Amino acid sequence: MDFALTGEQEALRDTAAKYLADERACADGDRAWADVTGLGWLDPELGTVELALLAEQLGHARSPLPWWAAMGLAGPALRAGGRAVRRPATLAWAEEPGPGTLAGLLALARSAGPGDGTAGCAVAPDGTLTGRKVAVPHAGEAVDLVVGVAGPDGIELRLVDAAALRPTPSDAGPAGLDPTRPAATVELSGVASTPLVAAHASADVLAEIRRRTLTLLAAEAVGVATRALAWATGHATTRTQFGRPIGANQAVAHPLAELYGQVETARSLAYRAAWSVDAEPGPVADRAVAAAAVAGREAATAACETAVQTYGGSGFTWEQPLHHWYRRAWWLATFDGTVSDLRAELAASLLDEATGQDAPGR
């Protein structure tokens, strides 16, 4: 099987890299969104492999764009409802108490039946929503808000005009783990909504949302790791001590060599997961996505930490750009669960495969 990129995919990746190389490209959110729309990054014809290539370049640039939320979190639900992604969009799923992760909401969608009110946010007979969603990514920038709610027949996905809401920032500014990845609490009090995905189909759509989102973020993590590795190797070859580059020392060179192998492995797994999401939906794709998410998150944090050591510790300061990529790496490492959670999920899935308990579309 040939996993080489096509000429069109390479061109898409190279164009994205060229655009994002200009630090002013994403400075103005409205202009940047218009740019990516014109570049075709929102086109429904793009497969997950193409989206992963874009996500990798966005991670390399540490772009603040909410593109990943629109295409990963909201995109599958909008498409299932007969709509296209044209404006900044995101998904509201977490509640307190209630499902705090995408996996939790997916499990609830698979198990909830008629009249099951286990999700706190609910839809009234007139279509209005009442409840409270927490940790909603890019809620302040979104125009379209997809909300997971409890309906009369189970979990539904409904569309809300975010312009009618006033999100309360919960992870933004310098206090946030990554200031370019803000989250907010959204209060829904009799807010009008439009149905997107009915209860009988919500589990399948939520499974697609989770696979695509984790895959895009795994690819983004590879981009972060690649940027940090490039900085570290560049510094190791140009910084001299005692008349020779510090990279000539085994204590510097060997960790960078090992890191290169780790990053390339993560890249291969991310591409494999992106292909699987479209070609092998179900348990096979779930395992590929979990493996890619683990490898990508670990590569990103390891690359940033190794780069900090190579720079002699200066990467910990706000003045050093590496510090900002390190924050993005840690945000990625904690999104919707930890690496340990994903490892446990992968192990359980492998055991299911070994015992013949895999179910199509699980």
Image (cartoon, rainbow, N blue to C red):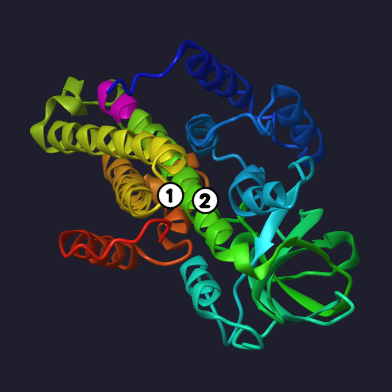
On-image quarter of the C terminus: bottom left
Question: Which quarter of the figure has residue 150?
Answer: bottom right
Residue 149 placed where, x, y %? 69, 75
| Residue tagged 2 | 213
The residue located at (76%, 24%) in the rendering is 38
Looking at the picture, tell me which residue is in the foreground, 122 or 291: 122
Per the image, the residue denoted by label 1 is 326
Question: In the image, is 357 to the left or to the right of 37?
Answer: left
Q: Could you tell whether 109 is left or right of 281 in the image?
A: right
Magenta residues (range): 233-237
Q: Is residue 47 highlighted in magenta?
A: no
State yes or no: discs 1 and 2 in contact (Cβ < 8 Å): no
Measuring from the top left, give residue 159's x and y in whole percent.
78, 61
Count the marks.
2
The image position of residue 255, as x and y in percent, is 17, 39
* Amino acid type of the residue tagged 1 in the rendering: Tyr
Query: How far from the left and from the top, in percent, is residue 37?
Result: 75, 30
